[in-house]
Amino acid sequence: MDVIKIIGIGIISLIIVIIVKQYKPEFAIYISIMAGVLILGLAFDKLTEIIKLLNNLASRTAVNGKFIGLLLKITGIAILTEFAVSLCKDSGETAIATKIDIGGKIMIVAVSIPIISSLLETVTKVLP
């Protein structure tokens, strides 16, 4: 199972980071970044399966395929933003982490504008 691989990478990386911090604390962040990249790589392998499933569901329903793509973009922005925020916090840079978090949220709102406008158009058509 992939979740066991992810947990294993996380725990092994944690142990290595704890050991390395005792001797060379400046190298601990590099190990943390590499572990994060490996874990994201394993998680993104499942992304293709999810995309295929969503496209299949969209083709069988009346959902606009454009909206599925936007939802995937929003999800990707959220995941990558959280990853960057976590890295910054692990490095002790909470100010940068906060700015990345705000920027990610603004990008999510910007990408979701077509969905919001379509929803508002639908609501105005339904209401007299």
Image: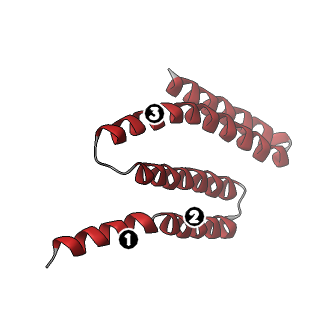
**126 on left or right of 112:** left
Q: Secondary structure at mark 3?
A: helix
Residue assigned mark 1: 117
Determine the image quadrant of residue 36.
top right
N-term mark: 1 or 3: 3
Look at the picture and state if 91 lies above or below 22. below
Q: Residue 24 or 107: which is nearer the viewer?
A: 107
Give the residue at the far bottom of this rendering: 128
> Residue at 79% across / 43% down in the picture?
30
Determine the image quadrant of residue 42.
top right
Residue assigned mark 3: 52
Q: Which quadrant, please, contains the C terminus? A: bottom left
**Label 2, label 1: how far apart the Cα atoms are:** 20 Å
Q: Position of residue 15 (x, y in %)?
A: 68, 33
Q: Secondary structure at mark 2?
A: helix
Amino acid type of the residue tagged 2 in the rendering:
Gly
